[in-house]
Image (tube, rainbow, N blue to C red):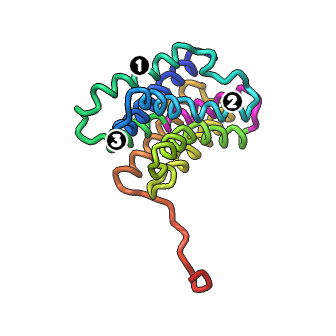
Amino acid sequence: MDDLLRWMDFLAIAVLAISGALVASRKQLDIVGFVLIAAVTGFGGGTVRDLLLGRTPVFWLQSPAQIGLCAGLSVFVFFFAHRIESRFRSLLWADAVGLSLYAIVGTETALAFGAGPAAAILLGIVTATFGGILRDVICNEVPLILRKEIYATAAAAGAALFVLLTELGFVREYAFLISAGSVFAIRAIAILRGWSLPTYRRRGEDA
């Protein structure tokens, strides 16, 4: 893994671990619970991606620094979460940053491992969303991916844009930043304005 991917991976794990620890604080878990939920959130999506790619051992088993980062941040949140005025709002924004980074990290990793464009986009979505799904299910929360605001769609748009920019020959670093920025922008607007996709409406025969 080159330097850009490594640093983006670290940053994505950091913000997702914080989002996991914030959920743990809302559920009033003990410090072990904080570490567990932070690890599930930070590593879950990338673990599923690696297993689907046949890339073993999975990434975090070879990186004690990432494990230490995740554990350290969860302990920090355990002691200081009470100082945050709105933990749910902070969770949404931390998750948005993690979503934007991991969508592109996952897509890039899949491409580097030989996946085709469509598979890479799908794996980017899995990488970005699956840790949050596991976090919310374990903590008995409605997963963010199932809430009304646009979520997985933002990851899909950014992953697709990254594949397109790569195919067009954009400088990789610029493609990464533009694509991750687009995911964050879509998710941020969805949070602020309540944007959502149309939902299924019952028809006469469904009643």
| Amino acid found under the numbered disc labelled 3 | Arg
> Are the residues at dot 3 and dot 2 in contact (C-beta closer than 8 Å)?
no
How far apart, in angstroms, are the residues tagged by discs 1 and 3? 19 Å
Identity of the residue drawn at 60% across and 21% down: 60
Q: Which mark is residue 50?
A: 2
Front-most of residues 181 and 205: 205
Comparing labels 3 and 2, the label whose residue is closer to the camera: 3
Q: Who comes first in sequence, dot 3 or dot 2?
A: 3
SS for dot 1:
helix
- Check disc 3 and report the residue beneath it: 26
| Amino acid found under the numbered disc labelled 2 | Asp
Comparing labels 2 and 1, the label whose residue is closer to the camera: 1
Q: Quadrant of the C terminus?
A: bottom right
Residue 124 x/y as whole percent:
62, 38
Identity of the residue drawn at 47% across and 24% down: 11
Q: Residues within 10 Å of mark 3 (few under 14, many from 20)?
A: few
| Amino acid found under the numbered disc labelled 1 | Gly
Identity of the residue drawn at 48% across and 30% down: 36
Q: Residues within 10 Å of mark 2 (few under 14, many from 20)?
A: many
